Amino acid sequence: MTKEKKQEFTLRITKANKSQMIVILYDMILQYLQDAISDYEKGNLKEYQKNIGYAKNCIDELLNSLNFQYEIANVLRGLYYFYKRELSTAAIQKKQELLPPVIKMIEELRKSFEQIAKEDQSAPIMENTQTVYAGLTYGKDSLNLNLSDQGSNRGFRV
């Protein structure tokens, strides 16, 4: 994953509520799997396996976020374990062709959670985060970030 993509995900995470976090995790899984396919095509099997491992870590986060007060959590748990098995097989056997079906299933599930996230009006999980303004300034075609309000109300108070 590129540095810019990591920054994008970090920014999205700082502003996300619980439902949006699930969508972000799906996006991260999809990005890692696309990176894995790209690495496989380049013949870089070590990075291929590493990206699959990162995707599995994101699935672990999804598993940890399940709320078993709802019946759907058991269905999702089964799906997540299936994804992890398929990804493990793809990494161990170095078979990239196992990834596209998993990607398609995750994309479909992501669409469902995106609809839920649109209806969720709860507050962001993180509080006291920096305000980031982005725009094209100080140069042609260069993106500069302006971090305002750095520290006036951030962190812990003793």
Image (cartoon, rainbow, N blue to C red):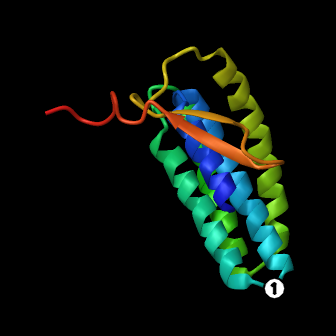
Vertical placement of residue 44 versus 67, above or below: below
Q: Residue 56: which quarter of the image?
A: bottom right
Residue kind at label 1, given as amino acid type: Gly
Q: Residue at x 59, y 55 (%)?
A: 81
| Residue 37 horizontal/vertical position (percent) | 81, 69
Q: Residue at x 19, y 32 (%)?
A: 157
Q: Residue 96: which quarter of the image?
A: bottom right
Which residue matches tag 1? 43
Q: Residue 21 or 13: which is nearer the viewer?
A: 13
Vertical placement of residue 119 versus 99, above or below: above
Name the side, left or right, on which 98 lies relative to 123: right
Most distant residue in the front direction: 138
Most distant residue in the left direction: 158
Name the quarter where the C terminus is drawn.
Answer: top left
Mark 1 element type: loop
Q: Residue 47 or 53: which is nearer the viewer?
A: 47
| Residue 133 horizontal/vertical position (percent) | 62, 33
| Residue 1 horizontal/vertical position (percent) | 68, 62
Name the side, left or right, on which 6 lies relative to 153: right
Vertical placement of residue 36 versus 119, above or below: below
Q: Residue 126: which quarter of the image?
A: top left
Q: Residue at x 65, y 37 (%)?
A: 23
Q: Residue 26 or 68: which is nearer the viewer?
A: 26
Around disc 1, counting alpha carbons within 10 Å, would you say few (fewer than 14), some (14 to 19), or many (20 or more)? few
- Residue 124 seen in this snapshot: yes
- Residue 74 seen in this snapshot: no
Q: Residue 108 or 119: which is nearer the viewer?
A: 119
